Amino acid sequence: APTEAPTKAPTKAPTEAPTEAPIKVKAEHIDVNDSNKDTNRKSTMLMMIK
């Protein structure tokens, strides 16, 4: 168990978030600066969780 969890979690989070954010920004195409701030906030949170 201790070996499985750390491998699963870090792989899932970083891959999911960065993929989701750019698609969202492209789709909405509104308030790009705001979206970037949100993406940066998510990235910072992910790094803090690691």
Image (cartoon, grey):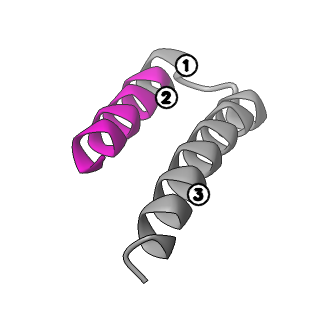
**Kind of residue at badge 1:** Val
The answer to if 47 sits in the magenta stretch is yes
| Mark 3 residue crowding within 10 angstroms, few (<14) / some (14–19) / many (20+) | few
Q: Nearer the viewer, residue 49 or 1?
A: 1
**Kind of residue at badge 3:** Lys
Give the residue at x 30% y 33%.
44
The answer to if 38 sits in the magenta stretch is yes
Residue 50 horizontal/vertical position (percent): 30, 46
Q: Nearer the viewer, residue 34 or 46?
A: 46
Q: Kindly report the distance in space between the C-alpha atoms of the residues bearing marks 1 and 2.
A: 5 Å
Residue carrying label 3? 12
Whether residue 6 sits left or right of residue 31 in the image: it is left
Callout count: 3
**Kind of residue at badge 2:** Ser
Give the residue at x 35% y 44%.
46
Whether residue 18 sits left or right of residue 1 in the image: it is right
**Magenta region:** 36-50
Residue carrying label 2? 35
Residue carrying label 1? 32
Give the residue at x 52% y 23%.
31
Q: Kindly report the distance in space between the C-alpha atoms of the residues bearing marks 3 and 1.
A: 25 Å
Name the mark nearer the viewer: 2 or 3: 3
- Quarter in which the N terminus is drawn: bottom left
Give the residue at x 38% y 40%.
42
Residue 28 horizontal/vertical position (percent): 69, 35
Whether residue 16 sits left or right of residue 50 in the image: it is right
Residue 22 horizontal/vertical position (percent): 67, 30
| Mark 1 residue crowding within 10 angstroms, few (<14) / some (14–19) / many (20+) | few
